[in-house]
Amino acid sequence: MRYWLMKSEPDAFSIDDLERVGTEPWNGVRNYQARNFMRDGMQPGDGVLFYHSNCKEPGVVGLAEVASEAYPDSTQFDPQSDYFDPKARPEQPRWMLVDVRFGRKLARTITLAELREEPKLEGFLLLQRGSRLSVLPVTRAQWKAILALEHRR
DNA sequence: GCCAACGTTGGC
DNA sequence: GCCAACGTTGGC
């Protein structure tokens, strides 16, 4: 079992939205590195840290799990979609996604600022300068270190 | 709203 | 294949 962090802007899709729908196709990822993590790295049952980005208090807000193998993101073929990709062809899809299933909300937001202060998280991809990946791997040690912060304060 | 950092595009 | 221009991400 592996661990991941997935970012979402709460204005667009929050942890509450995921709780409401239960399971959501993680569409709209248009970065090759992020796609490759979903396509080549993820397995059903993997752990996901749900992260709110581009908001007042960025940070980890909940837990989820990978709920499917990777499959083509249908929005790439839909001209009405914001995520439409005119170069994508159904016989050779360019963008893949996985389904993500709600796990639980954290007791509180573990903020980005806190993560930066945690020595055990040195080297964490999320915290590296200029890192903008919206889907990224988390080591088991990092996962544990992050969750250990939940009830510490 | 600003802007640093990064990815992508397209001319040459 | 280089690289300038442009677009996007996302913290602050």
Image (cartoon, coloured by chain):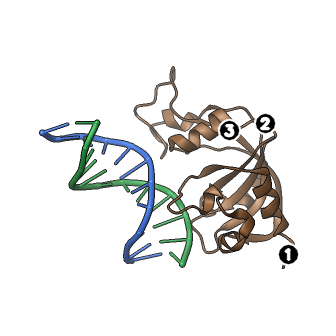
Chain colours: A brown, B blue, C green
Circle number at residue A98: 3
Q: Identify the mark nearer the N-term, 3 or 1.
A: 3
The quadrant of the picture occupied by the C terminus of chain A is bottom right
Which residue is identified by label 1? A152
* Residue occupying image coordinates x 71% and y 40%: A99
Q: Who is closer to the viewer here, A1 or A22?
A: A1
Q: Position of residue A51 (x, y in %)?
A: 68, 60
Q: Who is closer to the viewer here, A18 or A140?
A: A140
Disc 1, SS? loop
Q: Chain of mark 2?
A: A
Say which amino acid is labelled 3. Val
Circle number at residue A44: 2
Q: Is residue B10 above or below residue A105?
A: above
Quadrant of the rendered structure where residue A108 is?
bottom right
Circle number at residue A138: none
Q: Identify the mark nearer the N-term, 2 or 1.
A: 2
Q: Chain of mark 3?
A: A
* Residue occupying image coordinates x 49% and y 32%: A77
Quadrant of the rendered structure where residue A44 is?
top right
Question: Label 3 vs label 2: CA separation?
Answer: 9 Å
The quadrant of the picture occupied by the N terminus of chain A is top right
Say which amino acid is labelled 2. Pro
Say which amino acid is labelled 1. Arg
Q: Who is closer to the viewer here, A120 or A47?
A: A120
Visible residue check, residue A19 = no
Q: Position of residue A123 (x, y in %)?
A: 64, 59
Q: Is residue A98 above or below residue A108?
A: above
Q: Nearer the viewer, mark 3 or mark 1?
A: 1
